[in-house]
Amino acid sequence: MSQKPSKKFRINEQTRLHTFFLNPYENERFTRCPKCGALTKARKKVFVIHIEPGQLLNLNMTGRYCPACDLMILHKDVVEGLMAAAFTQINPSIIGNEYLIMGTLDRKTWLDIQAQPHNYSLVFDNLHVFKHVVKFEPEHYGWVPDPTLKKEKTE
Ligand SMILES: [Zn+2]
């Protein structure tokens, strides 16, 4: 574990969890892992999303997960549909803004946060930032890591 802390946001002492891939391909649902080819499992988690300007959303949703690779996959179209649904009533002007899926929360923390929805420090102090964020590109014979990204370090 020799991760350099990201300067993008305040780092807490929580363990980093999961390699994360936001799947932009609407015709590909990754029932198989793009890295090792094994079947992925449906996994429900609470994801913390930062939306410009300065809005946090905790989204309890199901993604695809490969236990062998510790790879968590969310489908971009599903995420954006849920985000739009969440903000249609309360803040429609934010829909379509830039956003970043930062990491995950434990279920217990999520319940605490629902009791105090505007306590952002509760979110930041308990956020499990992703270990790595990766991309995969379609190739003729399978999925390959995006060559424009730094090679993923093995743990
Ligand atoms: Zn895998």
Image: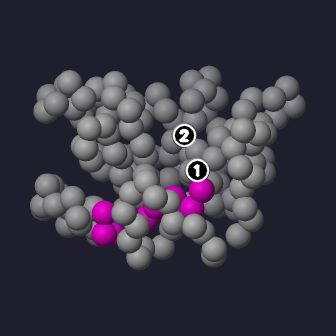
Residue at 34% across, 45% down: 50
Q: Amino acid at mark 2?
A: Leu
Q: Amino acid at mark 1?
A: Val
Q: Answer whether labels 2 and 1 touch (C-beta < 8 Å).
A: yes
Residue at 42% across, 43% down: 100
Dot 1: element: strand
Q: Tell me residue 60's x, y (percent).
A: 34, 49
Q: Quadrant of residue 135?
A: top right
Q: Residues within 10 Å of mark 2 (few under 14, many from 20)?
A: some
Locate residue 44 relative to residue 38 in the image: left or right: left
Residue 22 got which mark?
2
Dot 2: element: strand
Relative to 49, say whether 6 is above or below: below
Q: Tell me residue 90's x, y (percent).
A: 13, 33
First of labels 2, 1 by sequence position: 2
* Mark 1 CB near ligand 1 (8 Å cut): no
Residue 93 got which mark?
none
Locate residue 131 relative to residue 108 in the image: left or right: right
Separation of marks 2 and 1 at Cα, in angstroms: 8 Å
Residue at 57% across, 62% down: 131
Q: Tell me residue 3's x, y (percent).
A: 60, 69
Can residue 88 be seen in the rendering of this structure? Answer: no
Relative to 139, say whether 15 is above or below: below
Which of label 2 and label 1 is nearer to you? 1
Magenta residues, start to end = 124-132
Q: Tell me residue 25's x, y (percent).
A: 60, 27
**Where is the C terminus found, in terms of image quarters?**
bottom right
**Which of the two residues, 118 or 108, is positioned nearer the viewer here?**
118
Residue at 71% across, 49% down: 150
Identify the residue position indicated by label 1 in the image. Answer: 133
* Mark 2 CB near ligand 1 (8 Å cut): no
